[in-house]
Amino acid sequence: MTLNELVKSCRDIVFFGGAGVSTESGIPDFRSEDGLYRMKYAYPPEVMLSDEFFYSHTAEFYDFYRDKMLPLSARPNAAHIKLAELERAGKLRAVVTQNIDGLHQRAGSKNVFELHGSIHRNYCLRCHKQYPAEKIAESVGVPRCDCGGVIKPDVVLYGEPLDGATVEGAVDAISKADLLIVAGTSLTVYPAAGFVDCFRGKHLVLVNRSQTPLDSRCELVLRANVGEVFSEIEV
């Protein structure tokens, strides 16, 4: 069956996506040839995006974060838009994403489990006052709250645990799906990559430009850009 035929035949679809979902919106991924991990910095990006680095080198963290992790001008692409349409049509149960850019919600998706948090939520470490991403983007040096406390993005840094309620919701949705579409992810970042093992449904589809550990288990593997594939799906 084609992906379009599977989407038409299923009514309990879950989408599990990674960085490759947003590359067509102009946001670089991490592990491809042009990804962040191939760029040269004073510290490796995975170090600068760790909780230890945030607390010990806060100014350097924010120099990198503002430069590479705040794509506020990015717009949803065909994949984000189609997923929102599928949700409105009552076919898509949930989006589970490893991305922090908020593009699924911007496209209109409502039931989104953001495993790694969101750049659009920021809070003061002292008084917990909330701030939008624009506050971070417009700041110089270390952004601070009105109370003087340091503002921290509500994103999961290396060394931090995933949010328990988000994990529970994502696992529940995946375990109840009859069609799971995995797209734009290398499936090498754990624990998020292990969520696919919770799938008990009939149809497993992978959309990714490179090979993944999941390929042999899938009913359908599509080597293509995620947006191109989803633009051809009929709702």
Image (tube, rainbow, N blue to C red):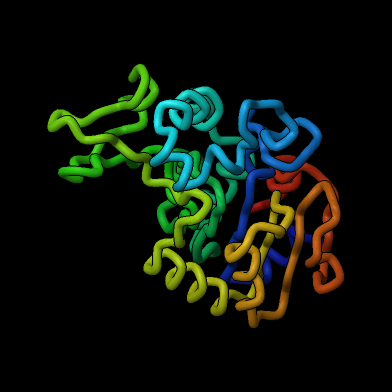
Place of residue 80 in the rendered image (x, y in percent of width and height, measured from the top left): 57, 44
- Which residue is at the far left? 147
- Horizontally, is 2 left or right of 170 in the view? right
Q: Is 19 situated above or below 135?
A: below
Front-most of residues 138 and 110: 138
Q: Please tell me which residue is depicted at 46% across the width and 46% down the height of the picture.
A: 52
In the rendered image, the quadrant that contains the C terminus is: bottom right
In the rendered image, the quadrant that contains the N terminus is: bottom right
Q: Please tell me which residue is depicted at 48% across the width and 76% down the height of the picture.
A: 172
Can I make out residue 88 in this image? Answer: no
Q: Place residue 166 in its image quadrant.
A: bottom left
Front-most of residues 126 and 181: 126
Q: Is 144 situated above or below 179?
A: above
Can I make out residue 123 in this image? Answer: yes
Place of residue 218 in the rendered image (x, y in percent of width and height, measured from the top left): 80, 70
- Horizontally, is 204 left or right of 131 in the view? right
Place of residue 68 in the rendered image (x, y in percent of width and height, measured from the top left): 56, 28
Q: Is 64 situated above or below 19?
A: above
Q: Please tell me which residue is depicted at 65% across the width and 26% down the height of the picture.
A: 41
Q: Place residue 8 in its image quadrant.
A: bottom right
Q: Is 83 situated above or below 14?
A: above
